[in-house]
Amino acid sequence: MTQTVAILGGGIGGLSAAHELTERGFEVTVYEVKGRFGGKARSIPISDETQVLGEHGFRFFPGFYRHVTDTMSRIPYGEHHTVADNLVPTSQSLMARMTGEEAVASTKTPETLDEWAETLRPGNSSNTLSSSEARFFAERMLTLLTSCDKRRENELENISWWDYIEAERMSEPYQQLAAVTQLLVALRPQDGSARTFGQIYLQLIRGQLDPSMEAERILNGPTSKAWIEPWVTYLEDNGVEFIHDAPVTAINCTRERVTSVTVDKTSSTEEVQADYYVAALPVEAMVELLTEELRRGAPSLARLDRIDTGWMSGIQFYLSEDIELVHGHQLYLDSPWALTSISQQQFWEEYILSGESDGTIDGVLSVIISDWDKPGILYDKPARDCTPDEIKAETWAQLKAHLNRNGTERLSDDVLVETFLNPAIEETDTGVVNREPLLVNTAGSLRYRPSAATKLANFVLASDYVRTNTDLASMESANEAARRAVNAILKHSGVRAPYCKIWELEEPRIFKPLKAQDAIRYQLGLPHPGETFKGISTPSRMLSLRSR
């Protein structure tokens, strides 16, 4: 008899779980609170009068993503392609500043240990960083690279990235570069775990330096067109049932198992029963569903309310001209609101904005705001205290302050046709509220995050707050969590089907012997050699000795 699964949430985690389960013979139903599937990745019509699409924020696929891109390679697109074929590489990143020189980042593959050390120096991107600071930062990275996994989890997890790289005593350019990872996740370096920040920083560098992978990829069209809609179609063709506008209002359980979930539909309330339940809800939604019974049955969920969320949300500027800037992302290093952007039309092969609009739109600059707490340059207010119109004007002003310099005007008010702010940013009496925040990996928060399997025999988790190798609020982590959830179902159900593949994060093999040495030191209760001496030069000397 076919076993049934109810998936609660139709974002990337829920769709990933549905994909793996239906291919293994389960009968799957997905319940989604919104009218569209894809979660934060979904595309959003900017108005009823146009086919132009907006988004929560631009989708970014770093080279170290393995899980989600593997799934994409199994989603048909057209007659002879897959959704993974819609991923296209970028080749440049613009590091823009309001003061100082901007730079266009280039990459090369290091061949020697000295070149590795040089590549890890953040000074490559700016001439305003002193050589001593650049060397110090590089040696902090080498200390991280040569730290064993247990030291990372039990020591680096519990201190902030800011403290680990000693940013407080450094120059402003150093602090700006230290915060670059904030442009990828909604997390201030002062708060974020050194383990998470450091590992992701290293993965981003690895993506740039490994010739076997593309450092950065994006989709060649709006996310729903290039990925989500073909995915839902594929899953429906394989028997998955999708129910939208169906919020989950209760998870009912005994001490041993979930007995049902309560779902509000358009005209009725339904008690959904299934053999297994996959909770693919964001952490803040899951917290709202926690009851004393659920906490007792699944004690790993008991401290979910201690996990922090942050604001990282997008705004799109639709232009009468396609202003490309560079063939990739833009990082606005000294923008108070930690802005990043990408000019998308240059990458969109089939989705032409002029054809989707009334002919007035030829380009779009998609921007993400990562810091909602610092005052801006126009109204001297943080983003969360601004009205939606003020957010639009302030963001545009910060972009122009970075791009229109030295007598060159790259952004003009004359080209701005339309602006679209993520509708999850809702106006209040005092500013705005974010209805779709992101999980943030604050220092010490790993202890609050559960594994995909719970003590309830038929209840598993498939969301980005689950413990994963990826360890980052991202599509990749949600997909990996879904795979772990499906593996837990397979283990319990006895269904004879292959387990989902899980990938480890890869790091340069050259550092493995030094990590092994540090594992011995950690077991003996000794500090990492890089923490023993001021200046942390020991890792560099050890690497130098190994290269002789």
Image: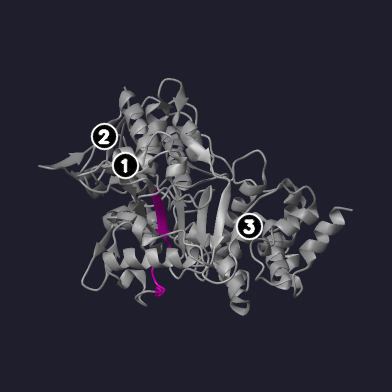
Q: Is residue 254 magenta?
A: no
- The residue at which mark 1 appears reads as 10
Q: Secondary structure at mark 3?
A: helix
Q: Is residue 116 above or below residue 159?
A: above
Residue 347 appears in the picture as rendered: yes
Quadrant position of the N terminus in the picture: top left
Q: Are marks 1 and 2 in contact (CB under 8 Å)?
A: yes
Q: CA distance from mark 3 to mark 2?
A: 42 Å
Q: For the view shown, which residue lies furthest in the right direction?
A: 548
Segment colored magenta = 364-377
Q: Secondary structure at mark 2?
A: strand
Q: Amino acid at mark 3?
A: Lys
Using the rendered view, name the quadrant where residue 52 is placed: top left
220 or 56, nearer to the observer: 220
Please state the horizontal and vertical placement of residue 299, each as a whole percent of the image. 38, 55
Residue at 36 percent across and 62 percent down: it is: 305
- The residue at which mark 3 appears reads as 150
- The residue at which mark 2 appears reads as 242
Please state the horizontal and vertical placement of residue 81, each as a whole percent of the image. 46, 25
Please state the horizontal and vertical placement of residue 98, each as a whole percent of the image. 51, 70
Label 3, residues with CA under 10 Å away: few <14, some 14-19, many ≥20: some
Which comes before the other along the chain, label 3 or label 1?
1
Q: Secondary structure at mark 1?
A: loop
Residue at 36 percent across and 54 percent down: it is: 316
